[in-house]
Structures are given as structure tokens and as C-alpha cells.
Amino acid sequence: MYYLKLGHSFQLIPVNTLFKTLLIILLFYIYTFQPPVINKLFYIGLEFVFFLIFISINSVKFIKMIKMFKLEIMFIVIIIIYALFRDIISGEIVYSDRFIAWFFQSFLMGSIILIIFEDNRESLFNYIYWASFIAALLSTLLFFSISFDNWYKSIQIDSYYETYASFEHRYRAYGISENLTFTYAVVMGIFSGYSFYSLKKNYLFILPFFIFLFATIINARTGMIAILFFMFYTLLKSPKSILRFLIFILILTI
């Protein structure tokens, strides 16, 4: 038995790998978006445990990866030291914890993920793409379903609902993720743009394109920059594909 492959090629793969694929996508969703239903420190703690286990097993590969980025690491360390010095002088923690958390979660954990998928980078992209698609779907459901939005409001610990409590209508911050009004929208914009670019290969990308686009619009306009970049790039690469796409959209609206 086969099912539609969760990858950008939309191929068929055996059902017996379904559970493993969905589990990996779920893990990437949690790692990438870190749903604010528990304290952020819990996510960092889990990642730190995984980090220690991994480097104890694959220390040689990890050290090799770190050596490749030694200049970048030196630059980041200088920034962290400056942030620590600034926070010590001011007597309050403002920047240092953010830089340290970013360095660990994005750089070190990112290096480990690259090592794990060093022989299969296409699968790595597919997992991240479909984890982001799930996030976009959840944003769409939160926007259109008041009951789902109220349920999520009851379990989340972020400040977005408090921020927009005085508004008659909440016009942004829909999603089960942190940083909804900045980096989240950028990620949605990137994958919306990628889906648009991929339309020239397969028109099945029409649905992900619009869902990613909608998730971008209802959170932050910064993500539109990435979408416009991909549209401009696609136009330069294949203007005929853009024309076919516009005709396709026109037919759908008739």
C-alpha cells in the first residue's frame, strides 16, 4: 500500500514509513516553532540533553563541523561577551540570554541536524517544509475557528492574547508558535514563495502556496518580502510558468 509522499516532489512511498515520517515532522515542528504551551526553558533543556547524548556518540563529526565555522563562532562569542558585559553593567538581563539561547538552539543544534542529515539534505528540507505547512494550517484554523482559538487561548502561555485583548478584532498573531509577528511570518513567507516557485513543476503546490500566504498575511507583513523575492526570481527564470499560473487562477475565479 502507498500514500502520497510528504515531500516537494509529491511521490508515492510505502505506508510502513508513515509513522516514522510523521514523527520526524512533528519533532521538526516542535524544534522550529516551539509552541508556547510550556516554558521555553523546557525546550532548551530537552535540546541540551539531546545535544549531550549526540556529541558523546558523534564527537568527531561534531568537532569537524565546528572547525568549519570557527570564524563565525568566534564572532558570535564576541557578541555574547559584549551582551554579558552590557547586562552586568546595567544590572538587568536584556540581551545576553537571548544571544546564548540563539547560539545554542540555532547554531549548535542546527549543526547537529546537518550532521544527522548530511547524506540526505533533500529529506531534511522536506521535513521542515511540511512541518511549516502544518503550522500554516493551524494558523488558518485559528483564524476561522473561534472555538479552536478559544481552546488554544486557554492552554497557551504567550502574551499575544493579552496584547490584543483591548482590540475589537484581533487582526494578527494567529498560530501555535513563538514569535508570531516576526520570524514566524518570515518562515511562512519563505515557504509560500518556494511553493509559488514550485508551481512550474507541479500545480499541486497551489494549495500550500495560498495557505502559507494566508498565514503570512494574518501575522506580519515582513514575510511578504520573501514571497515577492521568489515571485521576482520565478518571473526571471520562467515567465511562461507565471503566465500559465495566472491563467489557472483566472479560471478558478470564473
Image (cartoon, rainbow, N blue to C red):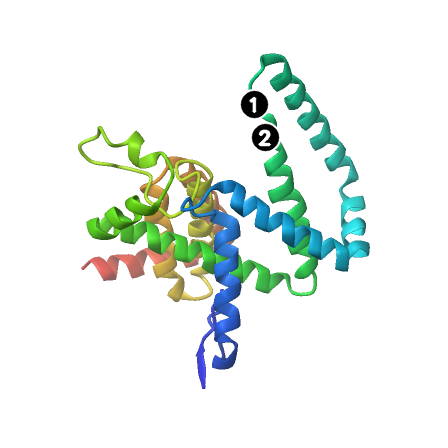
Q: Residue 87, how many percent across, how many down? A: 61, 19
Q: Residue 108, how many percent across, how many down? A: 67, 45
Residue 72 figure quarter: top right
Mark 1 secondary-structure assignment? loop
**Residue 236 is at least partly visible in this image:** no
Q: The C terminus lies in which quarter of the figure? A: bottom left
Residue drawn where x is 50% and y is 66% of the image: 23
Q: Residue 128, how many percent across, how many down? A: 52, 56
Left or right of 238, for residue 111: right
* Image vertical order of residue 90 relative to residue 129, above or below: above
Residue drawn where x is 44% and y is 43% of the image: 184
Residue type of the residue flagged with mark 2: Asp
Q: Quick one: label 1, few (<14), some, or many (20+) residues within 10 Å?
A: some
Residue 68 figure quarter: top right
Disc assigned to residue 97: 2
Residue type of the residue flagged with mark 1: Ile
Mark 2 secondary-structure assignment? helix
Residue drawn where x is 30% and y is 52% of the image: 140
Residue drawn where x is 51% and y is 69% of the image: 21
Disc assigned to residue 93: 1
Decide which of 2, 77 is in the foreground and name it.
77
* Image vertical order of residue 166 relative to residue 113, above or below: above
Q: Residue 145, how many percent across, how many down? A: 22, 52
Q: Residue furthest bottom?
A: 1
Are the two marked residues, 2 and 1, in contact with CB atoms closer than 8 angstroms? yes
